[in-house]
Amino acid sequence: MLILTCPYCGVDACETELAPGGEAHVKRAGPGSDDAAFESYMFDRANPKGAHLERWRHAYGCGKWFLAARDTVTLQVFGTYPAQTTEPPANVLAEIRKVHPNWEWSA
């Protein structure tokens, strides 16, 4: 079972208390962008096997959105952090690289 720590209320919440929100740090297509850019924003996702950054909502707790880094194969959680964070914190990246030394994050 997947257990994530909410960075806002500090509760270790199991997946039944959470609502998934897809890939984290996806840049929205802004005003004036063409249809192809908007289509890419809506549908193109990395969906990797291994380390991945995701959005989650503590639905049956504080209700806030947060971001999590986890391994999609093993369910190992590398860390969680507030949704307003524009890039993964250094400590989360360090935890990922302990298991996946060559892993690189790109916005």
Image (cartoon, helix red, strand yellow):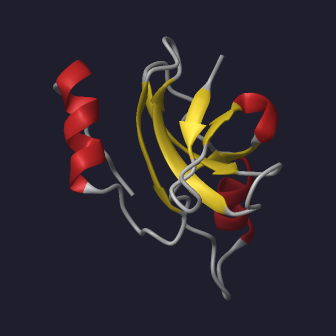
Q: Is residue 103 visible?
A: no
**Residue 12's quadrant in the figure?**
top right
**Residue 93's quadrant in the figure?**
top left
Q: Please name the residue shown 16% across and 25% down the image.
A: 101
**Residue 46's quadrant in the figure?**
top right
- Is 22 positioned to the left or the right of 103 in the image? right
Direction bottom: furthest residue: 31
In this view of the protein, which residue sits in the foreground, 46 or 91? 91
Indicate the quadrant containing the C terminus: top left, top right, bottom left or bottom right. Answer: bottom left
In this view of the protein, which residue sits in the foreground, 77 or 50? 77
Indicate the quadrant containing the N terminus: top left, top right, bottom left or bottom right. Answer: top right
Residue 103 vs 27, above or below: the answer is above
Q: Please name the residue shown 54% across and 64% down the image.
A: 83
- Is 35 positioned to the left or the right of 3 in the image? right
Q: Position of residue 28 (x, y in %)?
A: 62, 70
Residue 50 vs 107, above or below: the answer is above
Q: How many marks?
A: 0
- Is 10 positioned to the left or the right of 86 in the image? right
Q: Please name the residue shown 66% across and 55% down the image.
A: 40
Q: Please name the residue shown 63% across and 81% down the image.
A: 30
Q: Position of residue 75 (x, y in %)?
A: 52, 19
Residue 34 vs 48, above or below: the answer is below
Residue 22 vs 63, above or below: the answer is above
Q: Position of residue 102 (x, y in %)?
A: 18, 27
Direction top: furthest residue: 74
Q: Is residue 22 visible?
A: yes
